[in-house]
Image (cartoon, helix red, strand yellow):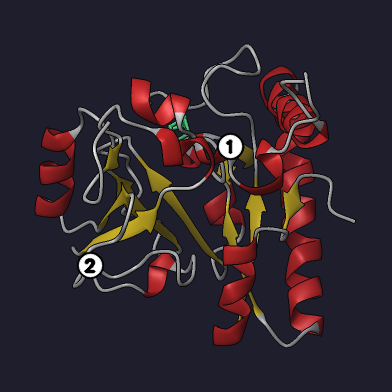
Amino acid sequence: MFKLLSTANPKIQKGTKLGYLSFILHLAPADLSGKETCPKRTVGCTAACLNTAGRGGMFKRGENTNMIQKARIRKTQYFFNNRAEFMVDLANDIKKAIKFAERKGLTPVFRLNGTSDLSWEKYTVVEGFNIFEMFPNVQFYDYTKVLGRKVSQYPNYHLTFSKADGNDSDVAEALMQGMSVVAVYDAIPAGVPSADETDLRFLDPKGIMLGLKAKGRAKKDYSGFVIRLKETA
Ligand code: SF4
């Protein structure tokens, strides 16, 4: 039904209890497609990327790719090779998603960097309008490791900063700027709100630290990307 977006992520579906339906765009992270989609990725986050969580990380014996990974690479190459058409398809998917969610009595919300870290504010859809300007009444949200993105003029786009191995000074700066920060833990400590409960980060208070539990390859990460409180290598 949708060319680019999906709703298949279990955490995304938890948001429906609060009346929201999240639509997510999964591109190929890092340079898996031959083009870079994560300009501030770290060694640890690249190796442990959420790209390998859930069905995206299930490979047949002896294989190192699957249909999901191939689809993400295909979409990413489409984005880089045919940007204008890609952005129109994305806008059309968003229109369809709005109707889809409304039929279910839910509020549609959109996360375009499911497994990438692109600065969507820079990409024009039509006549100088980016995707946030095209849909000013729709809520968009993302996690990012790119500090200083120029998004304050888009009240419908919420960013949460993402801690990784070696970006502590950016984390401190993000908190100073009033952003919330999410870190990945082997076990989320008491007192740290869980970002696994829902994906609806735009509902969070400003400037807080949140925890995500390590998933996929991140469970075996000892680079410093995952904060290990239970065990060490
Ligand atoms: S964790 Fe984020 S920044 Fe790192 S490779 Fe994956 S999508 Fe890119």
Residue 85 rendering spot, x and y as whole percentages: 78, 32
Q: Quadrant of residue 211?
A: bottom left
Apparent side of residue 150 relative to residue 179 in the rendered image (left or right): right
Three-letter residue code for mark 2 = Val
Q: Quadrant of residue 14?
A: bottom right
Q: Is mark 1 within 8 Å of ligand 1?
A: yes
Pick whichever, 83 or 70, lies toward us.
70
| Residue at 48% in and 70% down | 198
Residue sticking out furthest to the top: 34
Disc 2 residue crowd, few under 14, some 14–19, many 20+, Cα 10 Å:
some
Q: Answer yes or no: is residue 127 visible.
A: no
Q: Of helix, strand and loop, which one carries label 2?
A: loop
Apparent side of residue 185 relative to residue 177 in the rendered image (left or right): right
Residue 197 rendering spot, x and y as whole percentages: 45, 72
| Residue at 75% in and 31% down | 59
Q: Which residue is mark 1?
A: 51
Pick whichever, 92 or 71, lies toward us.
71
Q: Quadrant of the C terminus?
A: top left
In the image, ligand 1 is in what quadrant? Answer: top left
| Residue at 54% in and 85% down | 18
Q: Which residue is mark 2?
A: 192
